[in-house]
Amino acid sequence: MTFDLVVWALENGASAADVQAAHELCRQGEHVEGVPDPRLVAFYRAVTARYPDRGPSPASPWAAPLHCTTDHVEMKLTETCPDQVLLDIEQLAGSHGLLLFDPQDGSVYPPPTPVAR
């Protein structure tokens, strides 16, 4: 069994309903064409720097390679994925201004508010 998460690069101010609608369009085969959103490229590079998604590894949190498109990255995580990986994904999504979608229950998590230092 896997646990799926999807990070979405939608316009600023996108609502949970916007994310859910975009995900449903994707599931129906409707995809945005063009160049990948730079926020997704940066997210992909950051998450795979910590957790490479190519090549077999018993320590990998990925049940399958990441699926990258122009407006989202789908991640299939193993059922034994450590909580730290989930926390890292949430932090990286927030730091890149992406919305995190849980297709299991339809929850959308906005990026955490950055803490001023």
Image (cartoon, rainbow, N blue to C red):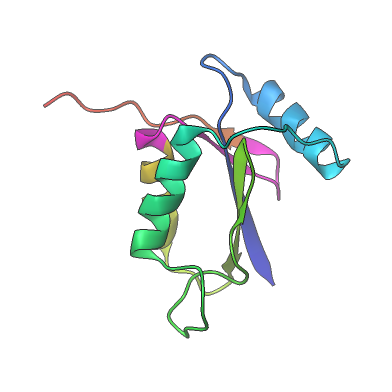
Q: Compared to 107, does 65 lie above or below?
A: below
As drawn, the residue found furthest toward the left would be 117
Residue drawn at 58 percent across, 60 percent down: 66
Q: Compared to 40, does 89 lie above or below?
A: below
User: For this view, does 116 lie left or right of residue 47?
Assistant: left
- Whole-percent x, y for residue 10 in the image: 59, 25
Whether residue 37 appears in magenta in the rendering, the answer is no
As drawn, the residue found furthest toward the right would be 28
- Whole-percent x, y for residue 56 in the image: 52, 83
As drawn, the residue found furthest toward the front would be 34
Residue drawn at 34 percent across, 35 percent down: 95
Q: How many marks?
A: 0
Residue drawn at 66 percent across, 32 percent down: 34
As rendered, which of 110 and 30 lies closer to the eye? 30
- Whole-percent x, y for residue 57 in the image: 47, 83
The quarter of the rendered structure image containing the N terminus is: bottom right
- Whole-percent x, y for residue 62 in the image: 54, 69
Q: Compared to 105, does 61 lie above or below?
A: below
As rendered, which of 107 and 39 lies closer to the eye? 39
User: Which quadrant holds residue 77?
Assistant: bottom right
User: For this view, does 32 lie left or right of residue 67?
Assistant: right
User: Which quadrant holds residue 16?
Assistant: top right
From which residue to which does the magenta span run? 94-107
The quarter of the rendered structure image containing the C terminus is: top left
